[in-house]
Image: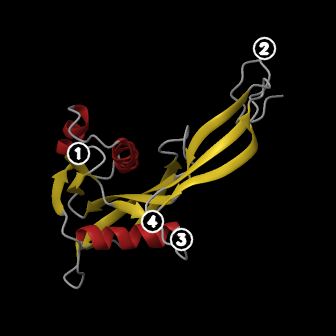
Amino acid sequence: MKKKNDLSSPNQQPIQPWRLLDKKNVFKSKWLEVNKEKVSLSNGKVIEDFYTLSGEKLVCIVAVTRDYKIVLVKQYRHGAKKVLWDIPGGGVNKKEIFIEAAKRELAEETGYESPKWIALGQFYPDPARSSTIKKIFLALDAFLSPKLKREEIFTELVALEQIKLMIKEHQIKELGANLAIILALQRLKGRK
């Protein structure tokens, strides 16, 4: 009998994880940690220099106002060398849990708060090289709080129909934001 998460076909052996033979940290900074790993594949082949990034915990938030507008942020992303549309999000601090980080990031980046939070799932942004995990949250009935000080990030409220068009026309380039918005739109079906 097949296990629930077994994606192998009936004629194949189950996929085996690689064995870690050695791991050396080759670079570490406040923002990034790179490791050189020696690994053995399930077929016995050894890779001497497989580079990985140490994972971090991240959150992203689809904040929806009472009148069904999504809070987008627009900011410069140096890796892409472009100003991009995105949704609020960021890192989870050491003694923080995911939901606390989501609430903090939404407030810091946009000045918005929400009384209703729903976890929509999680994903690995780059599973080939990193163990980083990103959790997606839907923040309902979001409102701009006059008491919050926020980062200098451009925000815009976008109607649901417009956000669908932005995704269809590839105006939102960040993969995780696209996934989060699509999951949020599925959850919101029938609410408006």
Cα gap from disc 1 to disc 2, whole angstroms: 46 Å
Counting residues from the N terminus, which is met first, the one under dot 1 or under dot 4?
A: 4
Q: Quadrant of the N terminus?
A: top right
Q: Bin the neighbour count of mark 4 within 10 Å (Cα to Cα): few under 14, some 14-19, many 20 and up.
A: few
Residue occupied by mark 2:
11
Counting residues from the N terminus, which is met first, the one under dot 3 or under dot 2?
A: 2
Answer with left or right where residue 84 lies relative to residue 9: left
Residue type indicated by callout 4: Lys
Q: Is residue 39 above or below residue 67?
A: above
**In front: label 1 or label 3:** 1
**In front: label 4 or label 3:** 4
Counting residues from the N terminus, which is met first, the one under dot 2 or under dot 4?
A: 2
Residue occupied by mark 3:
97
Counting residues from the N terminus, which is met first, the one under dot 1 or under dot 2?
A: 2
Q: Looking at the image, which is closer to me, 178 or 21?
A: 21
Residue type indicated by callout 2: Asn
Which residue is at a point 72% across and 19% down the rendered structure image? 9
Residue occupied by mark 1:
81
Which residue is at a point 44% across and 70% down the rendered structure image? 101
Answer with left or right where residue 131 lies relative to residue 19: left
Cα gap from disc 4 to disc 3, whole angstroms: 20 Å
Residue type indicated by callout 1: Lys
- What secondary structure is marked by label 2? loop
Residue 4: name its quadrant.
top right
Counting residues from the N terminus, which is met first, the one under dot 4 or under dot 3?
A: 4
Q: Which mark is residue 30?
A: 4
Cα gap from disc 3 to disc 2, whole angstroms: 42 Å
Residue 69: name its quadrant.
bottom left
